[in-house]
């Protein structure tokens, strides 16, 4: 008798759980709960059933509203008993739903028709509400599902890649070596053929960059505006960096870049112009334009124009340098180090302070131990070498291993210290730019060679290192 009572109580509790879901249940479980409790609710009075259903629907609505208006992609899947034509589906939806939407990338897989919506939560919800309300030409009810995603998970086939290559050709301006990929997935040529190319999709970005690298080797300017790009997408651009890249201008306006860490991913390019307008990161600095410009410049030392602003002119008019202090010393067991008396002292960043670093740097550069200068660079430093000398290998070298290779490849030098000219400019709270010009002798070259060094010097651990170095060697014109 006791066992029957326990079983009866357990069954009763199960029925109550089915009819009255707990507050911590997931949204995806609500529809199943309603179905499982349908039979039990039929035993309740009509008034009670309506009350409980209203409570459950209110709970669903409350949780739906907490998601806000989704700014991303929706994948709309419509399945019938047979494949459906695009025009039939769109006209059927428009006859019932009074919302505007732009279907992208329409395709058919078996009996399912699929298209995508971008940044249109109302339309996606309205279309999903037509589930089993629309009928196919054969009278069957159509199953409609809407799923959110950061970006469509797509890969272009060989035919689509040919069309994409044609699109890139039309968007390329050879006179300026400029490729304009603004709002690429809405390109009319691609839309007419239902080819969807959102650059937020890793494989699409990879395929696009591969076409660029194979067909536009002399690319100097690239526009990627209005593509919904985030920091994670920018790293893919490094595939365009090969040897001595020519990319000098990059337009990233109207994207979703929220911090400046991505600059470390593009400093391998000799950029002189960058546009970041209408990104969240610019809004962050809206009340601190000087700090914004100096921070970007500290990471991209070769940059001359930021958001259509001439950096040198702006800094000359608005920047009033104030002294600041940093620790300047290297580990005692490294080849480059300051005197022991200064190892724990604080110095103002002045010409004389920077000279301490440069004096130690140039005490090794003309010796057989030049390779040891690698410790004067941060682990992620960039060294760019440019020269019109046949003996010097041009290139961009990222990280200690590559910088070590560069230091070994450059012929032996002998610098004329008396010819040195030094200009020091603070770029930010943690970065100082040193520009050194002068002359030197290069092994294998009979005449004097002019050189230019632009070095961004930053605190690193307890020392003082170079994060970005541009080294130019040019034959002196006689």
Image: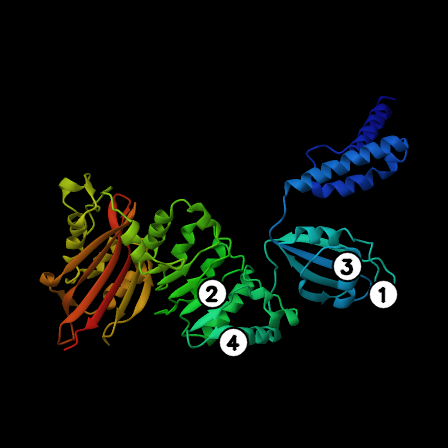
345 relative to 28 in the view: left or right? left
Mark 4 falls on what kind of element?
Answer: helix
Q: Is residue 157 visible?
A: no
Q: Can you give x and y, in whole percent of width and height, for residue 401 in the image?
A: 31, 60
State the CA–CA distance, disc 4 to disc 2: 14 Å
Is 316 in front, or is 341? Answer: 316
Q: Can you give x and y, in whole percent of width and height, for residue 16 in the image?
A: 81, 30
Residue that carries the numbered disc 4 in the rendered image: 169
Label 1 crowd bin: few (<14), some (14–19), many (20+), radius 10 Å? few
Which quadrant of the figure contains the C terminus? bottom left
Q: Residue extending furthest left?
A: 418
Image quadrant where residue 411 sits = bottom left
State the CA–CA distance, disc 2 to disc 3: 36 Å
Residue that carries the numbered disc 1 in the rendered image: 137
Mark 1 falls on what kind of element?
Answer: loop
Residue that carries the numbered disc 3 in the rendered image: 93
State the CA–CA distance, disc 1 to disc 4: 41 Å
Label 4 crowd bin: few (<14), some (14–19), many (20+), radius 10 Å? some
Residue that carries the numbered disc 2 in the rendered image: 223
State the CA–CA distance, disc 1 to disc 3: 14 Å
Q: Is residue 446 visible?
A: yes
């Amino acid at each position: 008798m006791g066992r029957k009572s326990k079983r009866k109580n357990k069954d009763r509790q199960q029925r109550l759980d089915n009819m009255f879901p707990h507050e911590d249940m997931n949204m995806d479980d609500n529809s199943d709960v309603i179905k499982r409790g349908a039979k039990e609710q039929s035993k309740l009075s009509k008034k009670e059933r309506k009350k409980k259903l209203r409570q459950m629907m209110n709970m669903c609505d409350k949780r739906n509203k907490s998601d806000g208006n989704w700014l991303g992609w929706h994948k709309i899947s419509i399945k019938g008993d047979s494949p459906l034509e695009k025009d039939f589906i769109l006209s059927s939806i428009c006859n019932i739903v009074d919302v505007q939407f732009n279907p992208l990338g329409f395709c058919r897989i078996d009996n399912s028709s699929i298209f995508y919506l971008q940044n249109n939560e109302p339309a996606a919800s309205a279309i999903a509400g037509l589930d089993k309300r629309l009928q196919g030409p054969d009278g069957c009810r159509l199953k409609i599902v809407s799923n959110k995603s950061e970006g469509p998970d797509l890969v272009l086939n060989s035919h689509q890649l040919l069309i994409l290559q044609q699109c890139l050709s039309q968007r390329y301006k050879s006179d300026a070596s400029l490729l304009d990929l603004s709002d690429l997935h809405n390109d009319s040529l691609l839309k007419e053929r239902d080819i969807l190319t959102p650059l937020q999709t890793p494989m699409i970005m990879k395929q696009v960059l591969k076409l660029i690298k194979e067909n536009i080797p002399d690319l100097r300017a690239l526009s990627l505006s209005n593509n919904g790009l985030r920091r994670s997408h920018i790293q893919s651009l490094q595939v365009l960096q090969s040897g001595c890249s020519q990319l000098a201008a990059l337009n990233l306006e109207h994207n979703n870049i929220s911090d400046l860490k991505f600059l470390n991913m593009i400093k391998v390019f000799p950029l002189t112009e960058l546009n970041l307008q209408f990104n969240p990161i610019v809004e962050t600095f809206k009340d601190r334009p000087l700090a914004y410009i100096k921070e970007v410049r500290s990471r991209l030392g070769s940059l001359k124009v930021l958001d259509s602003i001439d950096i040198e002119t702006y800094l000359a008019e608005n920047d009033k340098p104030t002294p600041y202090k940093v620790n300047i010393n290297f580990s005692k067991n490294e080849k480059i180090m300051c005197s022991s008396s200064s190892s724990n002292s604080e110095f103002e960043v002045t010409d004389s302070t920077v000279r301490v670093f440069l004096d130690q740097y140039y005490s090794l550069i003309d010796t057989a131990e030049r390779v040891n200068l690698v410790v004067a660079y941060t682990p992620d430093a960039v060294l760019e070498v440019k020269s019109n000398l046949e003996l010097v290998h041009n290139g961009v070298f990222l990280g200690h291993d590559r910088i070590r290779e560069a230091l070994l490849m450059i012929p032996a030098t002998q610098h004329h210290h008396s010819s040195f000219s030094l200009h020091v400019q603070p770029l930010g709270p943690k970065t100082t730019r040193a520009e050194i010009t002068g002359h030197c002798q290069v092994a294998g070259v009979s005449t004097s060679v002019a050189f230019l060094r632009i070095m961004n010097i930053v605190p690193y651990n307890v020392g003082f290192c170079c994060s970005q170095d541009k080294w130019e060697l040019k034959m002196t014109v006689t």
